[in-house]
Structure formats: C-alpha cells, structure tokens
Image (cartoon, rainbow, N blue to C red):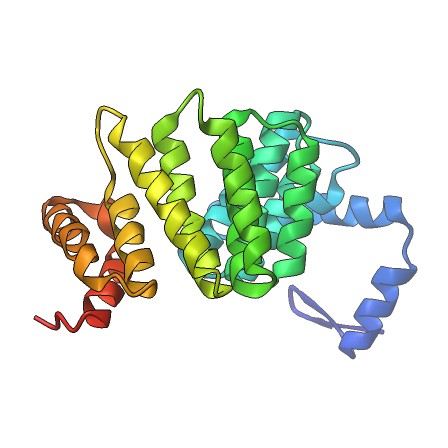
Amino acid sequence: HIMLDGADVRFRHPLIRSAIYQFAGASNRREAHRALAWALDAEQVVDRRTWHLAAAAEQPDESVALALEQTAVRSMARSGYAASAKAFTGSARLTPEHPDRGRRLFAAANAFYLAGRHDEALHCLDDAIACGPGRRAHFEIQHLRAVIEMWVRKPMAAYELLMAEAERALSDDPLAAAELLAEAVGPCVMAGQLQQALSTAQRAYALAQQTSGGPSLLVGVMLAAAMINCGESVGATHFLDESLAKFRAAGPESAMSGPLLLASLIDVERYD
C-alpha cells in the first residue's frame, strides 16, 4: 500500500490513504495527528502543525484554540475566506469559555459570509447568540444577520432586525440607535417600501440631532437617499451638501458611506 522513497513515505493511490484514515479508530487518528504535529517545524509550517494539534485534541484546549484563531486570521489576510471560516469554527469548538467561543463563532460567520456560504454563516450566528454575548457583541451578531438577510434572503426581515436592535440601544446609546435606524432605510428601499424608508430616515436624523456629535455621515446620506427615492430631490439638496462636506472632511470611517453618497449624487445628476 505504501512506497518508501528515501525519507518520504507515499501511498500508491490517494484513495488508499483515505481508506486507511477512515478505517482507523478515533484514538489512533489522534495519536497519528499528535505525532505529525510534533514532527513538523513550527516556524515553517505553523498552520499545518496547528491543524494536526486540533485534530489530536480530545477536549477544549485554549492554547490550540488560540493557535487556530491565528491561523484563521492569516487566512483572512490572504482573502482565504473559506479556510478562515473553517479555522475559526475549529477554534470555537476547542474554546473552553463562552465569551471567547461566541467571539470566534462570530468571526467564523463573517468569514462564511465573505465566502458566499450564507447558511453556514447564519448557523454560526445562532451558535454565537447561544453563548450569551454581551450587549455590544449581541449587536454585532444581529447586525451581520441583518446584512445577510438584506442581501441574500428577505430585506424586510433585515429591517425588523435592525429596528429591534435600535430599540435596544435607544436608552444607552442614542447615536448607535440612530445609525441602526439609518441602516434600516436600505432594506426598505430594496423592498420598495419607500415611505417607510423616509419615515425611518427622518426618525434617525431627528434622534441623531439630539446627540452631542449630531447626525453622522451615514444618517445624513440615508435621509437624502430616502427623500430622493420619494421624489423629494429638491428638499434633499441640503442633506446632500451637508453629507458631501462631512465626507470631504472625514477619514477612513467614511469608506462605507461614500458609495451611498455617490449613488445619490448620480441620481440627482450632480456628476461633478
């Protein structure tokens, strides 16, 4: 079944390799993975070594979970989203504590989303919620769920999620609530609920005006977009000008709102 070539050991056919691996018992597999992990040079093949350590683990182990998380981060940096999702999922499985497990499940969901594997992303978000996340983590989980719902499932389901999160944030963080309301405008427009989009955008702007920082770029942009979609292009001019000034003065945080502003400027033929 195998051929020896100097220091290399090769199977005559890949199917033989798979058959032997599947036939072996769980304890034998773990023992083999453990031996391979310690035989590999940790500096040169750190990710391969980490995967063998994970396959050898019999119970949650934070040191292996952390190593897998680092592998996932490296894969993400290379735009290897599917590989990153697999590593984050493995890391979460080996994590002893709920908060870290939830954080890694959320990261896995984000990687699955970027890889176009939306059902797996939603499954990870369900598991992350089950870990009992704090308020901020809960918001991030539900926000990603809303993004997935908006783009690949039902826009108005995303609207309901964002509105629910806005209500949760209203008393503690009105600025965050205003941002969530502004984001809820998009699903309404996608679903053709234009008057609902406008009323939501107006509520977001009014709420943001009551905060110390005032309306953010996103809040102003979404109000202008909602007004334009409802045929109120002249009235939207003030909010477009205000948003354009903020965009020019803003730093990297304007990156997500920039394309939305651009679309509205094109809609009213302000091509310059």
Percent across and percent down for residue 158 are: 55, 51
Q: Which of 117/46 is in front?
A: 117
Instruction: Choose between 129 and 246: the one closer to the eye.
Output: 246
Q: Is residue 112 visible?
A: no
Furthest-bottom residue in view? 13
Q: Residue 47, image x and y in percent?
A: 54, 50
Question: Which residue is situated farthest in the top direction here?
Answer: 172
How many dots with numbers?
A: 0
Whether 177 is drawn above or below 46: the answer is above
Question: Which residue is most to the left?
Answer: 272
Q: Residue drawn at (19%, 69%), measured in percent from left and top? A: 268
Quarter of the figure with the C terminus: bottom left
Whether residue 148 sits left or right of residue 196 in the image: it is right
**231 vs 207: above or below:** below
Q: Position of residue 38 (x, y in %)?
A: 64, 43
Residue positioned 57% across, 46% down in the render: 160
Q: Is residue 85 visible?
A: yes
The answer to which quarter of the image holds residue 1 is bottom right
Give the x, y percent position of residue 210: 27, 26
Q: In which image quadrant can residue 34 be found?
A: top right
* Residue at the (66%, 32%) spot, across then down: 95
Q: Is residue 263 above or below residue 107?
A: below
Picture quarter containing residue 8? bottom right
Residue visible at 48% across and 55% down in the picture: 75
